[in-house]
Amino acid sequence: MEKIRIDKWLWAARFYKTRSLAVDEIDKGRVLINQLETKASREVKAGDVVAMRQGHYARTVKVLGVSDKRGAAPVAQLLYEETPESLQARALAAEQRRFGTEPAQSLTHGRPTKRDRRDLQKDWNNRWSASVDE
């Protein structure tokens, strides 16, 4: 077997959990073969370069072998080799995500959290009052 459909190869190489997820990503234009948009029925062969988006990361791999059967992860990793540029970009993106800000910290409105409610109750006893007690 020297050629196989790209959706089957992506599934067999364990980039996507199901073939339908692979087809969805291909239809959205997130998978390129040799820098060209493709269809799920496009055949891939050894030597092709596949660029894809997997979660938050963009990956570029060189196809080393083809298989239509989904095997164990160590066997699936023998089907491709990730390019050094892709490895470096993924490591940089992971580091940026790790040191990035928490999206919830930027929320300044909306429903108060439990901590916000506690802080509001602390201030409740110290608030100004128009009473004549003082």
Image: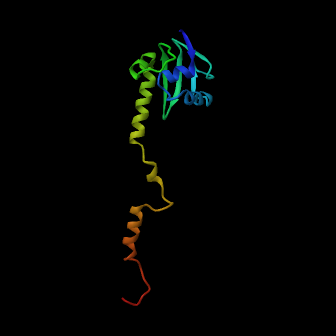
Q: Residue furthest bottom?
A: 132
Residue under the image location 44 percent in, 86 percent down: 130
Q: Residue furthest top?
A: 2
How many numbered discs sit on the rendered protein? 0
Residue under the image location 55 percent in, 30 percent down: 21
Which quarter of the rendered picture does the C terminus lie within? bottom left
Q: Which of 30 and 77 is in front in this view?
A: 77
Rendered view: 122 above or below 5: below
Residue 45: percent from left, percent from top: 54, 12
Residue 24: percent from left, percent from top: 59, 31
Q: Nearer the viewer, residue 12 or 81?
A: 12
* Left-right relation of 45 to 78: right
Residue 37: percent from left, percent from top: 62, 23
Residue under the image location 61 percent in, 18 percent down: 42
Rendered view: 46 above or below 133: above
> How did the renderer colour the structure?
rainbow
Residue under the image location 37 percent in, 77 percent down: 125
Residue 49: percent from left, percent from top: 52, 17
